[in-house]
Amino acid sequence: MDVWRITVAALRRWYILLPLLGVTVALVLAAGRGGQPEYEVTGASMVVPGRIYDEVPNPYGGPSDATNAVAIVLNSPAARQQIADEGLIPTYEVSPESRSTIIRFQVRGESEQQAIETGTAVFRMAAVELQERQSAAGIRLAAQYSIDVLQQPSVSAAVTDGKLRNMAIVGVLGAGLSLVVAVFFDDVIGLLRLRRRRKQEKGTSEGDHSDPARLNDPDSDSGRETETLPEHGTRPGAEDQAPTLSEQGMISRRR
């Protein structure tokens, strides 16, 4: 079925399509009222070198290398699983800035408090990661790299992308389903009318081809030929015949 036929069928069954579209609008509004906004939390930290120099080589290399290494560890599945085990949001984003020791953090969640706690836990994990690996390498505490939080995790915006997405999904699905129902109902009515028309044509055809024996029966109404006799015994069509010459002479003698 092409687009034109679908459009015609939908317009023909407007009394079905319009109520369904009304229900769809109500569902879209309900989805918009029920959707909760999401809170976007951001933060930033920086890898700071130790206060003294240690002759023991640092396993992280320079400060920039340490920043990239910490970001890789924080983005690993093991780190995300640890955050999830704490009941926090594992879908956070950690990205180191190019040629810098700054690490930026971002997370989005339905709970403002949960999102903030996620950022705090991620920065704490970065600090523990640096301390444990450097301590295991024999680097003194005063010479170790550490995490300095430049921006504490805080709400930067309240976004409604999820709310709008839910409304769009409900609207598209509802409108599509309404159109399908209207077109299907139009097809059903068309099939019923076609079946009724065929039955009528079949009945008419059977009535035209009646029983030949009944047609040849002289006693039957269909086989009996009736003839209407003219009044006063005149022949049929006599009043339409012109008088003959002899009849004209008789008529003149009478006068």
Image: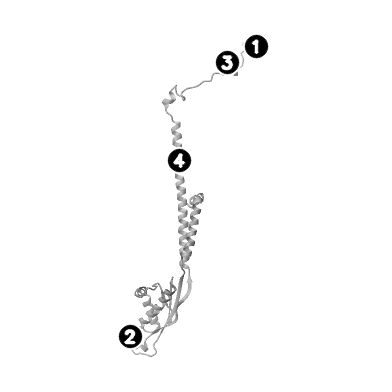
The label number, if any, that marks residue 135 in the structure image: 2
Q: Is residue 237 above or below residue 210?
A: above
The residue mark sitting in front, 4 or 2, is: 4
243 on left or right of 203: right
Earlier sequence position, callout 1 versus callout 4: 4
Q: Quadrant of residue 162?
A: bottom left
At a point 47% along the width and 63% down the height, the residue shown is 31
The residue mark sitting in front, 2 or 3, is: 3
- Is residue 1 visible to the viewer in this orientation of the structure? no
Q: Distance of mark 2 from mark 3, alpha carbons?
A: 144 Å
Q: Residue tagged by mark 4?
A: 196
Q: Residue tagged by mark 3?
A: 232
| Of residues 240 and 121, the one drawn nearer to the viewer in this rendering | 121
Q: Distance of mark 2 from mark 1, alpha carbons?
A: 156 Å
Q: Mark 4: which amino acid?
A: Arg
Earlier sequence position, callout 2 versus callout 1: 2
The crowd level at tag 4 (other Cα within 10 Å; few <14, some 14-19, many 20+) is few
The residue mark sitting in front, 2 or 1, is: 2
The residue mark sitting in front, 1 or 3, is: 3
Q: Mark 2: which amino acid?
A: Ser
Q: Distance of mark 1 from mark 4, alpha carbons?
A: 69 Å
Q: Residue tagged by mark 1?
A: 251
Q: Is residue 217 above or below residue 193?
A: above
Place of residue 190 in the rendered image (x, y in percent of width and height, measured from the top left): 46, 45
249 on left or right of 54: right
Earlier sequence position, callout 2 versus callout 3: 2
Say whether marks 4 and 3 touch (CB < 8 Å): no
Q: Distance of mark 4 from mark 3, alpha carbons?
A: 54 Å
